[in-house]
Image: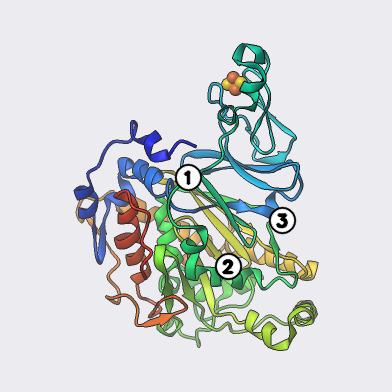
Amino acid sequence: MTDIREACAKTTPRISEAEIRALVRPDRIHRRLYTDPDLFDLEMERVFGQAWILVGHDSQVPKPHDFVTTRIGKEPVIMSRDANGAVHVVANRCAHRGLQVCATESGSTRHFKCPYHGWSYRSDGSLASMPNAVSYGGRDAIADPANGLRPVARMAIYRGFVFASLSPTGPSLDEYLNGIKTSIDDLVDRAPDGEIAFVGGCSRYIVRANWKTQIDNGVDLHHATYTHVSTLDADGRQFSRHGGGPRILIDGKRSIDWEPFGVVGFPYGHGYQGRPPVETLPSGPIYEDYVSRLVAKHGEERTKAILKYDRFNSVVYPSFTFQAFGQHVRIVRPTAVDKTEIRVYPVALKGAPEAYNRAAIRSLAATHSAASMIQTDDIEVFERAQRGLASTSNDWVLFAGHPGKGEEWHEGGWRGSGTSEFVSRIQYAENWVSYMCGGQGNAVA
Ligand code: FES
Ligand code: FE2
């Protein structure tokens, strides 16, 4: 695939490096990062065109010839499984005149047939046939990889999560994920069979706000006290009334001391929030059945370690957030500077009782679906932020809480107080600036 920076160079308005650097200070960022369409275009080219982006999960294409379509930044792509079972991520772009060859979101097909002049592509992206082939050079033209659906520059899979980078250079996926792999492991290890699957459908919503509001929020513990007050107040009635699951321990207080739970930040801008103890741990025959299956696979000690609920949201910069405890994955898909699509996938733990996985889907519908009780709170604040940032009264957005970079070295990253905003500072001052100035993110903790 042509290097995306090269491809976009002709269309993206140039913003100088000095100008980009002036927009980010150690403890604050300029409001233009949320409101400037030119910066948005440059982000799609330089952040989403460089970093490893989560495309999906290989369980979305379980059988040969299954596919899903999505985007990496502005690039339309197809994730497919070929006849031999290998997963591919290729451009959804006909090599002839550029049409999207696949207009459906998911399905199964041996061939993607372009509706314009009938070029037909295999499920690995290679060209299978073209009408009137002789006029294009016959067999040689059909066999020419340049006439196929072009593969992304790099593709790699970690525990079923399919990532792609549009850049041929940069850190390997392993280097890129670094310490946040422990969060992915924390999710996948909960499956007695050691694998998860996206099989519970997808909840989707469009937020009229910049994509970064969702990522900022993924490492922001202390907003919960205020944004989610109707769930977290003394009787938590909104949540419990709707079977949302165990509520967070607040000792009957309106205000929670988040500090002890901490946040952890890693190189390349990833991070996770620590988790307060829950008031009621899961129990009952279904849960016991689930635990016994884990014990049968791993023994008592390891099962205890797996079931430790010490993490809340995890964020893989720039567009992948998930909760191991909440059994879901969110993919953030920027659409415009002030418009973002969020896809929420419930995660089934393979080997867990069916009823256990079903309960997780029900709980997620109460917390993070488009009409849920918790996510709707967040959507409201994201959209109000977007509207407020139209104000010219103040140029700056603050991430100044708990200056510094965390107090303690922890699992290959830094751990700071629960309300520290240092993970966002790592994302902006070290990674966003690096990508936007043509770099490859910051490998240094
Ligand atoms: Fe696809 Fe012509 S544009 S076959
Ligand atoms: Fe929230």
Residue 43 image position (x, y, % from top left)? 37, 46
* Label 2 environment density (alpha carbons within 10 Å; few <14, some 14–19, many ≥20): some
Figure check: 207 above or below 227: above
- Mark 1, secondary structure of its residue: loop
* Label 3 environment density (alpha carbons within 10 Å; few <14, some 14–19, many ≥20): some
Q: Amino acid at mark 3?
A: Val
Indicate left or right for 214 with 11 as reference: right
Give the camera-side residue of 369 and 221. 221
Is residue 254 visible in the rendered structure shown here? yes
Proximity of marks 3 and 1: CB atoms separated by less than 8 Å: no
- Indicate which disc, 2 or 3, sits on the residue closer to the N terminus: 2
Of tags 1 and 2, which is closer to the observer? 1
| Residue located 30% across and 67% down the image | 399
Is residue 255 visible in the rendered structure shown here? no
> Which residue is identified by label 2?
184
> Which residue is identified by label 3?
199
> Which residue is identified by label 1?
166
Report which quarter residue 413 is drawn in: bottom left
All told, the count of numbered labels is: 3
Instruction: Compute the Cα span from label 3 to label 1.
Output: 27 Å
Q: Quadrant of the C terminus?
A: bottom left
- Mark 2, secondary structure of its residue: helix
Of tags 3 and 1, which is closer to the observer? 1
| Residue located 64% across and 27% down the image | 143
Indicate left or right for 14 with 116 as reference: left
Indicate left or right for 6 with 142 as reference: left
Instruction: Compute the Cα span from label 2 to label 3.
Output: 18 Å
- Indicate which disc, 1 or 2, sits on the residue closer to the N terminus: 1
| Residue located 65% across and 67% down the image | 363
- Indicate which disc, 3 or 1, sits on the residue closer to the N terminus: 1
